[in-house]
Image: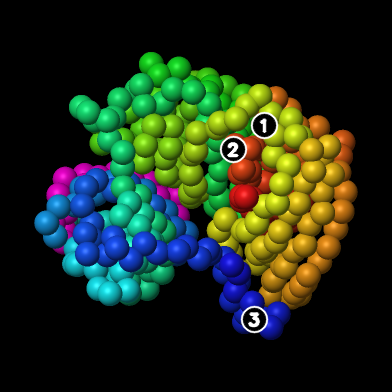
């Protein structure tokens, strides 16, 4: 879903999604260990936070989070607090009482299911939103073996004061501390070079699911919190404050026939009111031909029920492809039913869109 207001300079540009609730999960409330992510704005600028908070009996104990406030990263340990029971709509409150520097120290959430909730900060002057996902923790906790295989990552942020930043790519992990990275980055409408950038890092997984990476070309790399094996929230610790997700890639080797079908699509995150946000429906056939109907909105223009037909570029065996025949890679398949793609890639504020059957 996207906000749809008359296109004026004061229009709100926003994107999100509607999820069906499982009402039977309200009575159980929160129970277990949850990874969470939130992004938005505070007095210093763009802010992102990812972390983990164990919940039991109304109390939060021994939580940990990494936050990046306008390019100033910090790691916060010993997070404690309380949370309330869910009401008949699935609404509950969260109060992180220590340490005091945690952004989003007071939040409201809405339960989607027993393992998934949406979360919004309610602290004065700091509007940001996100979600929390119950962790699937193996016996003995997470370890380096929790990353083992191929994954797709995607994120959005800001390129200083000059525009937006969007990124996606592939991780290849061996379960013992080595991670190969293929990275595509759009910086305010210009592809970073080389495109893609490929390199290898060393990773380390803590028992609570926190992942750090290091090594040549990996200085100031992102930090991650696992929700399950090969699945995580991620946050960069540089000035772009990019926040996003990591998902396991399944179904390869890929071809155009791998994901024929009908997909709904939508903007991942609106990082600035200059973003052009959109939703749509895409139909692909096994030969790469497509038809798409989209709605886009911006402060200066709206486009409703726009239609287009064409043919995508070659789908590579690793799931990368171009939305334009003969064009550079701008999309990656996560599975046969889900992919991510750059949009507005030549504009000052590029975005990531997610397509899913």
Distance, label 2 to label 1, CA atoms, is 7 Å
Crowd band around label 3 with a 10 angstrom C-alpha radius: few (<14), some (14–19), many (20+): some
Task: Tell me the residue at 79%/38% (across/down).
Answer: 286
Residue 14, quarter of picture: bottom right
Q: Which mark is residue 319?
A: 1
Q: Is residue 266 above or below residue 153?
A: below
Residue 28, quarter of picture: bottom left
Residue bearing the label numbered 2: 334
Q: Which residues are magenta?
A: 59-82
In the displayed structure image, the side of residue 48 where residue 101 appears, left or right: left
Q: Secondary structure at mark 1?
A: loop
User: Which numbered disc, 3 or 1, marks the residue closer to the eye?
Assistant: 1
Q: Is residue 328 visible?
A: no
Q: Locate residue 113, reporting x and y percent.
A: 35, 57
CB of mark 3 within 8 Å of CB of mark 2?
no
| Mark 2 vs 1, N-terminal side | 1
| Mark 3 vs 1, N-terminal side | 3
CB of mark 2 within 8 Å of CB of mark 1?
yes
Q: Secondary structure at mark 3?
A: loop
Residue bearing the label numbered 3: 5
Q: Is residue 83 above or below residue 115?
A: below
């Amino acid at each position: 879903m996207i906000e749809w207001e008359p296109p004026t300079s004061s229009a709100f540009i926003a994107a999100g999604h509607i999820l069906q609730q499982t009402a039977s999960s309200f009575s159980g409330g929160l129970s277990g260990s949850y990874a969470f992510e939130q992004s938005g704005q505070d007095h210093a600028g763009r802010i992102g936070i990812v972390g983990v908070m164990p919940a039991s009996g109304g109390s939060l104990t021994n939580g940990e989070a990494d936050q990046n406030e306008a390019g100033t990263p910090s790691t916060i340990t010993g997070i404690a607090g309380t949370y309330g029971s869910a009401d008949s709509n699935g609404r509950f409150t969260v109060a992180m009482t220590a340490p005091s520097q945690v952004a989003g120290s007071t939040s409201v959430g809405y339960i989607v299911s027993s393992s998934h909730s949406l979360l919004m900060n309610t602290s004065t002057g700091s509007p940001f939103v996100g979600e929390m996902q119950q962790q699937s923790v193996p016996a003995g906790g997470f370890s380096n073996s929790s990353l083992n295989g191929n994954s797709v990552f995607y994120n959005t942020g800001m390129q200083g004061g000059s525009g937006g930043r969007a990124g996606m790519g592939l991780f290849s992990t061996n379960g013992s501390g080595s991670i190969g990275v293929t990275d595509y980055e759009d910086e305010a409408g210009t592809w970073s070079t080389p495109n893609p950038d490929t390199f290898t890092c060393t990773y380390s997984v803590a028992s609570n699911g926190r992942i750090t990476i290091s090594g040549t070309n990996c200085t100031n790399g992102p930090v991650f919190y696992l929700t399950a094996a090969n699945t995580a929230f991620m946050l960069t610790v540089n000035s772009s404050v990019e926040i996003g997700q990591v998902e396991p890639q399944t179904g390869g080797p890929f071809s155009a026939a791998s994901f024929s079908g009908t997909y709904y699509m939508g903007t991942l995150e609106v990082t600035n009111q200059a973003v052009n946000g959109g939703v749509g429906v895409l139909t692909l056939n096994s030969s790469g031909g497509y038809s798409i109907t989209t709605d886009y909105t911006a402060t200066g223009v709206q486009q409703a029920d726009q239609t287009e037909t064409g043919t995508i570029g070659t789908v590579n065996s690793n799931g990368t492809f171009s939305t334009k025949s003969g064009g550079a890679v701008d999309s990656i398949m996560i599975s046969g039913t889900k992919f991510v793609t750059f949009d507005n890639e030549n504009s000052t504020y590029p975005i990531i869109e997610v397509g899913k059957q």
